[in-house]
Image (cartoon, rainbow, N blue to C red):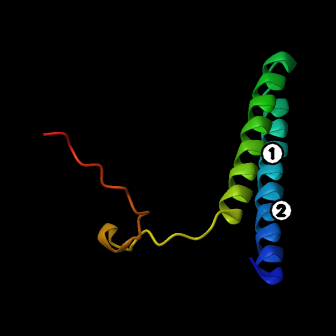
Amino acid sequence: MSGAEAKLSAMAAESTAVALTERIDALAAALRAAGVAPEHSSRLLAAAAAATLHAVTLDALRDEAPQTHAAEPAAQRTRPAVAQIPLAA
């Protein structure tokens, strides 16, 4: 990955993190406004934070993964050579 691509990837992951953090903040405000008990709110917010962490991690991993060509027909993909083992008669 080139330097520019890495920077764009980091910006995308950061943008995802910021957007999800804003949604967690909005969820917290909505829970408070609705009068949800703090014990319930804390569990919901903890689950939302964990989901956010997973989403950002997956986003970063996806950006680091080598690009594959899913549209490429299977017959055209290269496969490692497999040794032929003669069968006993």
Q: Camera-side residue: 68 or 19?
A: 68
Circle 1: element type = helix
Closest to the camera, between mark 1 and mark 2, is 2
Within-10-Å neighbours for mark 1: few <14, some 14–19, many 20+: few
Give the residue at x 82% y 70%.
11
Quarter that holds the N terminus: bottom right
Q: Camera-side residue: 43 or 32?
A: 43
| Quadrant in the picture for residue 46 | top right
What kind of residue is marked 1?
Answer: Ala
What percent of the width, then of the height, locates residue 47? Answer: 74, 30
Left or right, 89 with reference to 59:
left
Reading the image, the residue beneath label 1 is 26
Left or right, 79 with reference to 12:
left
Q: Camera-side residue: 6 or 45?
A: 6
What kind of residue is marked 2?
Answer: Glu
Give the residue at x 74% y 58%.
60
Image vertical order of residue 2 relative to residue 61, above or below: below
Quarter that holds the C terminus: top left
Name the disc covering residue 37, or none: none
What percent of the width, then of the height, locates residue 59? Answer: 70, 57
Within-10-Å neighbours for mark 2: few <14, some 14–19, many 20+: some
Give the residue at x 77% y 51%.
20
What percent of the width, then of the height, locates residue 63? Answer: 69, 65
| Quadrant in the picture for residue 72 | bottom left
Reading the image, the residue beneath label 2 is 14
